[in-house]
Image: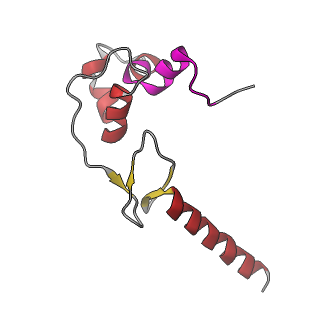
Amino acid sequence: MFSFAHNSCSRNHRRYTLCGLHSNEEHAGDWKNCTQCREGMNIEMYVYFGTNEYNFEALPDPPAFEPTKCADCGKVIVLGDSSFSFSTSGYRCDSCTARIMSEMVRSAKGKSSS
């Protein structure tokens, strides 16, 4: 059975680090200065993938970035660690996502009963 558990060092390193991404994508050179890796993802996720606990060696001098905030309420969302949704409107925290989904369900129910 498949699991999303984070209890496999090998799997975590392969899936959640720049080193793993760099290797999986078969980029040339050293992962620490790979332009393809840097430009291929959101800066916050680049820093997370380069500095999280699944790295054997952390990214030296990770770039600074502005925190990601919920498009509705402004709460800070930590992309590498928080639950969130993303749409053309931007990122939304769990609370705002739940509110919007409830509104959509109520609206759909109202339309089906007319």
Q: Quadrant of residue 65?
A: top left
Is residue 78 within the magenta segment? no
Where is residue 94 shown, x and y percent of the image?
52, 56
Residue shown at 25% from the left, 49% from the top: 66
Q: What secondary structure characterizes most of the magenta part?
A: helix
Q: Please, is residue 28 above or below residue 71 in the view?
A: above
Residue sticking out furthest to the bottom: 114
Where is residue 78 shown, x and y percent of the image?
40, 45
The residue segment tinted magenta is 4-20
Q: Is residue 104 left or right of residue 33?
A: right
Q: Please, is residue 91 above or below residue 49 in the view?
A: below
Q: Please, is residue 60 above or below residue 110 in the view?
A: above
Q: Is residue 59 left or right of residue 114?
A: left
Residue 40 visible to the viewer: no
Q: Which is more toward the observer, 25 or 5?
A: 5
Residue shown at 70% from the left, 27% from the top: 2
Residue sticking out furthest to the right: 113
Q: Quadrant of residue 114?
A: bottom right
Residue shown at 23% from the left, 30% from the top: 62
Q: Which is more toward the observer, 105 or 93?
A: 93
Residue 33 visible to the viewer: yes
